[in-house]
Amino acid sequence: MTINAPAKINLFLDILGKLDNGYHSLFMVMQTVSLYDEIEVEKRDDGKIFILCDVPGVPTDEKNTAYKAAKYFFEKTGIKSGVTIKIQKNIPHEAGLAGGSTDAAGVLKLLNEVYETDLREEKLCEIGLKVGSDVPFCIVGGTCLCQNTGGVISKLKPIKKSFVVLAKPEMGVSTPKAYADADKAYIYHPDCIRMLDCCEKGDFDGICRYAGNVFEQVVEVPERVEIKRIMNENNCSLCQMSGSGPTIFGLFENKEDAEKAKEEIKKVCSRVYLCETV
Ligand code: C5P
């Protein structure tokens, strides 16, 4: 059984504070986009979880989010079985696009089908949150408000269909370090009240005006200025970093503008994708 597991972008990301468990309470507006990893699962009789991935450098052991998802699924359901998980990666990893989280979400959805366990979305999200903060959103998808450490999810009105250019600079970002740097910095907080109001009203211009990502204040991505310049020159409605970076996304109303931006960004950045909001 196979599934397409989509990437996400953050239209809004604010860190509200640090919790006693060391994690951070967040206020995020997340959006699914049409760049997909392909996941295939097959039952095994030997009780082992076996990961195959077409991209070198992605861990295939218990550190892989898909492995963790399968392990927690079997623990939660008490099913004594194993599984082979094949992952064809199209989403760049460690990019701020939830590449690992969406694989975990895809595995949970597939196992729920394959083993006919009929777990409700909430239960899958509960298991998913043990794997990573973005997994519950990846299970629900669309346009959502995600709070606390990612487990409190409210569906929002879908935003206006847009073309999305994703530009992934070479550098990798350590998410724990990004949070630690945010703890040390004085953070200017974007306006979550106005953002949410615009989401409720379906006010796309307002969403673009009040969007924000506090990680842009602490994660330095050298190519960001040039990528944003190109996106802005090609009439993007919004350009912003996704998650803890380094990927910069641009939303475009017009496909030709998005294509032009993509071609120009290729001169500064080797990995550029054109997709759409889902
Ligand atoms: O859950 P996820 O894999 O996205 O988290 C990676 C790391 O980011 C965590 O180990 C933690 O250091 C940090 N984090 C955090 N607060 C969150 C989410 C992540 O401090 N809400």
Image (tube, rainbow, N blue to C red):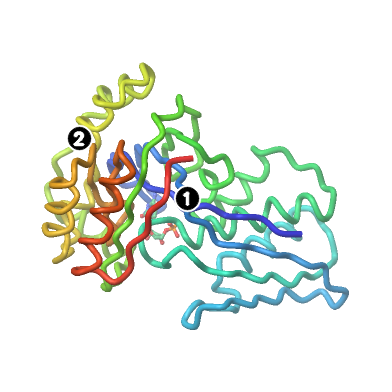
Question: Where is residue 73 shown, x and y percent of the image?
Answer: 71, 57
Q: CA distance from mark 1 to mark 2?
A: 21 Å
Q: Residues within 10 Å of mark 2 (few under 14, many from 20)?
A: some
Q: Is residue 251 left or right of residue 43?
A: left
Mark identifier at residue 190? 2
For label 1, the residue is 134
Answer with left or right where residue 188 lies relative to residue 208. left
Q: Amino acid at mark 2?
A: Pro
Residue 180 appears at what percent x and percent y?
Answer: 25, 60
**Residue at figure coordinates x 35%, y 47% from the top left:** 164
Q: Are marks 1 and 2 in contact (CB under 8 Å)?
A: no
Q: Is residue 76 left or right of residue 23?
A: right
243 or 260, which is in the foreground? 260
- Is 137 above or below relative to 78? above
Q: Position of residue 198 (x, y in %)?
A: 31, 21
Image check: 200 left or right of 138? left
Picture layout, residue 4 above or below residue 84: above
Crowd tier of the residue under label 1, counting other residues whose Cα lies within 10 Å: few below 14, some 14–19, many 20 or above: many
Give the structural element (helix, strand or loop) at label 1. Answer: loop
